[in-house]
Image (cartoon, grey):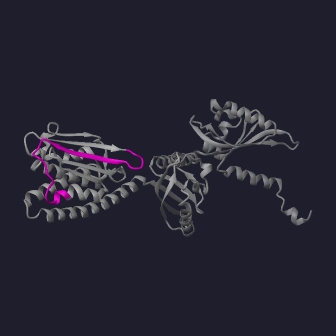
Amino acid sequence: MSDEADSRILKPSLLGAYLSAIVAHSFDAIVSKDLSGTIQSWNPAAERIFGWSAPEVIGRSIRIIIPDDRTAEEESILERVRAGEVVAQFETVRLRKTGSPVPVAISVFPVIDAAGKVVGASKIAHDITHMLEVRSRLRESDDQFRLLANSIPQLAWMADSEGSIFWYNDRWFEYTGTTLDEMRGWGWTRVHHPDHVERVVTRIRHSWETGEEWEDTFPLRSRDGEYRWFLSRAMPLRGPDGRVSRWFGTNTDITEQRRNQQQIEFLMAEVNHRAKNMIAVVQALVSRTAGRDYGESLAARLQAVSRNQDLLIRRNWGGASLGELIVSQLAVVSDLVGSRVHVDGQLDFMLSPSAAESIGLAIHELTTNATKYGALSNATGEVRITCAVDEDAEHGKLRIVWQEAGGPPVAAPARSGFGSVMIDRSPKMAMHADIELGFPPEGFVWRFAAPLAVVRSAG
């Protein structure tokens, strides 16, 4: 061995000084004991952690710092040390001089003499009180986060900086019926609608690459196979260097909002359509009514239109039942319904809004004519309104018959007025209806037949 190499080898006395300094200034308790557990050495850190001074414990059993419920643990340590085994660091509890517990992380190493025989053990104990407090706060923070994440109605998730998703909240799994293993990474594409997934992936990749916030709307498949619409957003979380470290995203179910919006748009279009129709009807009423009992006739016809609107509005423009419509237009003779005016048949048939408007005006005109000139113009005449639905697969028809009896003798009118338009031409044009007008002496007859496909409510 060269002189230079020999100079780098510490002399035993100097090596001992170094080791003593390390033991004396260590922040961890370093304790040695023989194979029976009797304490042989006790450094300053052990005094600080356990509260016993070295003179108080050297020569006494290590069991003075071991809780009663950990006695078996110490016996196991000694047994393993006798076998020459190193006891790797583990967390446990020891006692201070005051009797209070102190959490520690302990490692134990066998002490071997020059002959290779195990003669004792060296124990290193690290006070982990602060570490456990930090761990507890982290666990509490994690529990609070999970509670919050699982309490919100949205589906929530987190992805790494590359956009690979590694966590979902419980709402996601409850809705999709999937597992984390199935959804990890890019597995979420499996629950996207095939018509939208390519577009969604393209847009979200752009955000992953640029760090821009992401927002999109698309349908997701539920565990039952139903697709519902979600508004989805993702925010980048950045580190001190400004780089994206992860992404936090949510999916909010907007299916009902979309349906409501579509319904509002439909209703607005329907209102616009109805308003235009109403203006046309009013214009026709005015032009036809002018010159003969103008004010009274016009008011009555406008009230008939109003009654139609009231029925349709109550049902959100979804249509009106035939029975409700007829009874509403018999308002001026409501006291006669059941005695001299009889309504029967399939009255629960649901009419479309346009059919309800046209049929309602026709019933109003028939009622007006009956009270002025027909069966209801005297004290004995009667009117029977019979409704039937023929459900023939190809040629299904709604049939209504207005039959008068007991009134003044009937004759066909010499000319046709606006009333004739309402009961004849208007239904033909609006509903492709077949209209038959009969004028036998015993009483006027109006027969109506229109295709079910035209008059039936879609709702």
Which residue lies at the image location 34% right of the left edge and 60% below the top edge?
Answer: 265
Q: Decide if residue 121 is on the left or right side of residue 227.
A: right
Q: Decide if residue 295 is on the left or right side of residue 456.
A: left
Query: Image quadrant of residue 67?
Result: top right
Which residue lies at the image location 71% right of the left edge and 52% below the top edge?
Answer: 22
Residue 355, magenta (yes or no): no
Q: Decide if residue 56 is on the left or right side of residue 411.
A: right
Give the prevailing secondary structure in the magenta stretch. Answer: loop
Q: Is residue 440 above or below residue 286?
A: above
Q: Is residue 99 above or below residue 429?
A: above
Query: Image quadrant of residue 383?
Result: top left
Q: Is residue 210 above or below residue 193?
A: below
Residue 105 locus on image (x, y percent)? 65, 44
Residue 405, magenta (yes or no): yes
Q: Nearer the viewer, residue 204 or 160?
A: 204
- Assign the N terminus to one quadrant of the image: bottom right
Identify the residue at the far right of this view.
Answer: 1
Residue 292 locus on image (x, y percent)? 8, 61
Q: Is residue 37 visible?
A: no
How many callouts does the rendering have? 0
Residue 197 locus on image (x, y percent)? 55, 60
Q: Nearer the viewer, residue 128 or 243?
A: 243
Q: Is residue 189 visible?
A: yes
Q: Is residue 242 above or below residue 52?
A: below
Q: Nearer the viewer, residue 153 or 203?
A: 203
Q: Decide if residue 165 is on the left or right side of residue 345.
A: right
Q: Nearer the viewer, residue 333 or 39?
A: 333
- What's drawn in magenta, residue-wise? 391-420
Residue 71 locus on image (x, y percent)? 67, 31
Which residue lies at the image location 19% right of the left edge and 46% below the top edge?
Answer: 328
